[in-house]
């Protein structure tokens, strides 16, 4: 006598995999769950199917369904990809150090300035308020200085 799983065991396994997909969210386990449900239904009508054939059918049906339908139901632009190393800020305080150059304090931490050439030498004053355009790759990038004649914490 060949080793077999009962039809209800395969059906239960398929339902469990489909429910597991709700928690995983990868949209892969669903197809194998459907394959197990179909293999369980076939086992109901063909009770002499051995375990190897049952598992082969379940996995083969799951792979075929995933190949044909996964891309159809998962959008390429499901979520916008965001560069986690970039964010914006408005103001920071400039600090000069002897050996390592210019730093700005903004958003509660020290940042090395990524574009020190954006700040003219006349405006490199310790404690001056500067405009930070963005933070990218652990560096602060300063905005271009304002062209008007108003003095604004180090900017002319």
Image (cartoon, rainbow, N blue to C red):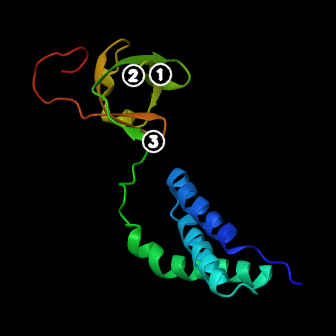
Q: Vertically, is 99 above or below 60?
A: above
The quadrant of the image that shows the N terminus is bottom right
- Front tag of 3 and 1: 3
Q: Which residue is mark 1?
A: 110
Vertical arrangement, residue 115 with respect to residue 54, above or below: above
Which one is nearer the viewer's eye here, 141 or 136? 136
Quarter residue 150 falls in: top left
Image coords of residue 136 (percent x, y): 42, 40
| View extreme (right): residue | 1
Quarter of the C terminus within the rendering:
top left
Please name the residue that numbered disc 3 is placed on.
85
The Cα atoms of the two marked residues, 3 and 2, are separated by: 14 Å
Q: Position of residue 141 (x, y in %)?
A: 36, 35
Q: Give the residue pinned by disc 2.
A: 107
Residue 14 vs residue 25: left or right?
right
Q: Relative to 125, is 116 above or below?
A: below
Left or right of 72: which side holds 60?
right
């Amino acid at each position: 006598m060949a080793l077999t799983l009962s039809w209800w065991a395969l059906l239960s396994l398929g339902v469990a995999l489909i429910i597991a997909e709700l928690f995983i969210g990868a949209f892969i386990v669903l197809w194998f769950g459907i394959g197990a449900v179909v293999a369980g239904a076939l086992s109901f009508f063909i009770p002499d199917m051995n375990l190897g054939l049952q598992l082969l059918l379940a996995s083969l049906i799951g792979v075929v369904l995933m190949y044909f339908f996964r891309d159809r139901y998962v959008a390429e632009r499901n979520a916008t990809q965001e560069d986690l190393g970039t964010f914006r800020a408005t103001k920071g305080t400039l600090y000069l150090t002897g050996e390592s150059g210019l730093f700005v304090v903004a958003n509660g931490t020290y940042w090395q300035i990524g574009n020190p050439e954006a700040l003219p030498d006349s405006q490199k004053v310790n404690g001056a308020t500067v405009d930070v355009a963005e933070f990218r790759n652990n560096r602060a990038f300063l905005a271009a200085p304002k062209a008007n004649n108003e003095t604004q914490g180090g900017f002319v």
